[in-house]
Image: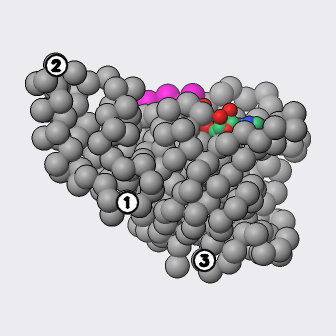
């Protein structure tokens, strides 16, 4: 069972115009896996996460979560939202209650979890390093980092099978970042699928299982985590800048989203070295 994207296209409607955000995406996110999504600004990362959690529906194609098609019905979307929790890129956009406690307990209450709520909350805030005193505060009055942690806590509290996090490290201090890395690894060990959009690649280099790269709404490559970070180290050694890297990936890899046609990442390093030698 997994989150499966099949030929997914997504357009936003804006001022009666269609804005293309995702194009023919085919991929699968699995449980017990840490999947990282990379891409330049506007490449479609946040849109992808919202499709995975049935907050958006494909314009065409399908998103199937644990066998449930998000386009089927309101009931199917409710079931998917229970299975896939999403931490938004801008935490304020998910807050709407008066206290941090209410915010963290809203989803579990909504999904019928009534017992030991206080214990669940205390355990999660300890793991994330949220001060217990903040439970009575308004989430809107917190600092950026604390807001981020509360947004994460309010998703962990209903224990979804998959946790999609959009830039979860932004605003966190060093301790907060390290705590979150440990937590992500723990979630994976508990069998959860973790889907993470981030620019803080360094933090995930030892734990990422796979890396997906988006460019202009297309999935241009997928790497095994270890191979991706080896490649990245080589790029640093060769003094490639990240934007150049995206350009090169697009040139070297077929962009028809059939991953089997891609150049194996191991060979890419050789190609890049060659590319550099030729003075490109
Ligand atoms: N609500 C919206 N209405 C219209 N267009 C949108 C909307 N949200 C996103 N878009 C457009 O869809 C495309 C993909 O946006 P998306 O937010 O998914 O990218 P992203 O990779 O998350 O970017 P960032 O790194 O800046 O967060 C962009 O061209 C963006 O301008
Ligand atoms: Mg985004």
Residue at the spot 68% in from the left edge and 26% down from the top edge? 143
| Separation of residues labelled 1 and 3 (CA atoms) | 22 Å
Residue at the spot 12% in from the left edge and 32% down from the top edge? 274
Read off the magenta span. Answer: 171-176
Q: Bin the neighbour count of mark 2 within 10 Å (Cα to Cα): few under 14, some 14-19, many 20 and up.
A: few
Q: Bin the neighbour count of mark 1 within 10 Å (Cα to Cα): few under 14, some 14-19, many 20 and up.
A: some
- In what element is the residue under mark 3? loop
Q: Is residue 231 above or below residue 86?
A: above
The answer to whether residue 87 is magenta is no
For the question of whether residue 113 can be seen, the reply is no
For the question of whether residue 191 can be seen, the reply is yes
Ligand 1 image position (quadrant): top right
Residue at the spot 61% in from the left edge and 60% down from the top edge? 8
The residue singled out by tag 2 in the image is 279
Q: Nearer the viewer, residue 81 or 17?
A: 17
The residue singled out by tag 3 in the image is 66
Residue at the spot 81% in from the left edge and 38% down from the top edge? 17
| In this view, the mark in front (1 or 3) | 1
The residue singled out by tag 1 in the image is 259
Provide residue 259's location: percent of width, then percent of height: 37, 60
């Amino acid at each position: 069972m997994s989150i499966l994207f099949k030929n997914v296209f997504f357009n936003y409607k804006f001022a009666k115009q269609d804005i293309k955000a995702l194009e023919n995406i085919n991929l699968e996110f699995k449980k017990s896996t840490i999947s990282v999504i990379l891409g330049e600004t506007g490449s479609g990362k946040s849109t992808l996460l919202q499709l995975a959690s049935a907050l958006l529906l494909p314009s065409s194609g399908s998103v199937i979560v644990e066998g449930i098609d998000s386009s089927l019905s309101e009931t199917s979307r409710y079931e998917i939202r229970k299975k896939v929790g999403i931490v938004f890129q801008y935490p304020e956009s998910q807050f709407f209650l008066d206290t941090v406690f209410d915010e963290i307990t809203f989803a579990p209450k909504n999904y019928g979890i009534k017992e030991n709520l206080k214990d669940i909350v205390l355990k999660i805030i300890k793991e994330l390093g949220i001060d217990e005193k903040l439970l009575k505060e308004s989430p809107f009055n917190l600092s950026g980092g604390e807001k981020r942690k509360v947004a994460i806590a309010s998703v962990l509290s209903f224990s979804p099978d998959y946790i999609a996090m959009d830039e979860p490290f932004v605003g966190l201090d060093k301790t907060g970042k390290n705590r979150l890395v440990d937590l992500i690894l723990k979630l994976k060990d508990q069998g959860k699928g973790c889907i993470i959009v981030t620019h803080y690649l360094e933090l995930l280099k030892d734990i990422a299982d796979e890396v997906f790269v988006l460019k202009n709404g297309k999935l241009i490559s997928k790497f095994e985590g270890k191979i991706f970070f080896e490649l990245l180290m080589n790029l640093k050694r060769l003094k490639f800048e990240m934007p150049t890297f995206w350009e090169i990936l697009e040139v070297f890899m077929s962009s028809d989203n059939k991953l089997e046609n891609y150049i194996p990442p191991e060979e890419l390093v050789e190609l890049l070295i060659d590319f550099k030698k030729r003075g490109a």
